[in-house]
Amino acid sequence: MNPQLENIWERMLNLGLGALAHANRHAAYCCMENEQWPDLAILQAAHAAEILIKARIAQEHPLLIFDKLPSMSDSELSLDDLFEKGKTIEWSELPARLWATTGITVPNIAEYKEFGKLRNGIQHFVPSFASEAASVKALKFIFDVIDPFINDCWGLYAIDYDEDYDPYIYFAPCLIENKIKFLVSKDAANCSEDWDVDWSAAEPAYREEMQRRIAAARSVG
């Protein structure tokens, strides 16, 4: 393999996780100076998913994420050639390529497809959404699709990626308030006593499931 392409998937993974943290921040919080955070959260969540899926495909081989490769001018392709002239596969084609190259399926594929349409609508037509509705849609996608995907692939948790200076304390309660089921990391579970959550207000089935996940995460050695 061209040395320039070795471990490029790790750089893609880090970029995707950065986009995920940005999406979580914009979906779970509000900004008085910028009312576009909810719609931006949808764009960023979709961007994160696309990069993370491509990272897993590239982990098998970097050229597998390309739909069209540039013409070779010498004995091998350079990273610059790919960056300037290569064309990577589209959002709609990613699930099939992922399965063909890794045997992994995108979780909740119907939701993945619908979210792609939502992302396109915002990106190309800028529709008006109620802020809360857009934020919840972004969070639901993140924790229904991205969360189980990165956990299955790399043992990561979407709850761990948040740009708040005080991680978990405000982010986890936002998810619980919106009845978002999420995978619980050990770090998140260890500070769950500090979450400002009124568990009595949660639906019994949801409360029991999340408290089970927290207890299970705490018990991990």
Image (cartoon, rainbow, N blue to C red):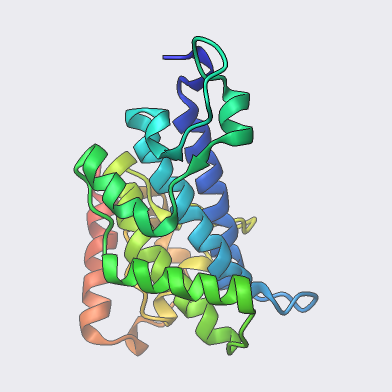
Q: For the point 36% across and 89% down, which residue is it? A: 201
Residue 53, relative to residue 117: is it above or below?
above
Nearest the eye: 10 or 115: 115
Q: For the point 34% across and 62% down, which residue is it? A: 145
Q: Quadrant of residue 67?
A: top left
Q: Is residue 29 visible?
A: no
Nearest the eye: 122 or 145: 122
Q: Is residue 74 visible?
A: yes
Q: Is residue 9 left or right of residue 97?
A: right
Q: Quadrant of residue 37?
A: bottom right
Q: Quadrant of the N terminus?
A: top left
Nearest the eye: 75 or 8: 75
Image spot of residue 70 (x, y percent) = 53, 30
Image spot of residue 17 (x, y percent) = 51, 47
Q: For the point 47% across and 14% down, which residue is it? A: 2
Residue 68, relative to residue 193: is it above or below?
above
Q: For the point 60% across and 85% down, which residue is it? A: 131
Image spot of residue 149 (x, y percent) = 31, 52
Image spot of residue 200 (x, y percent) = 33, 87
Q: Is residue 80 left or right of residue 69?
A: right
Q: Quadrant of the C terminus?
A: top left
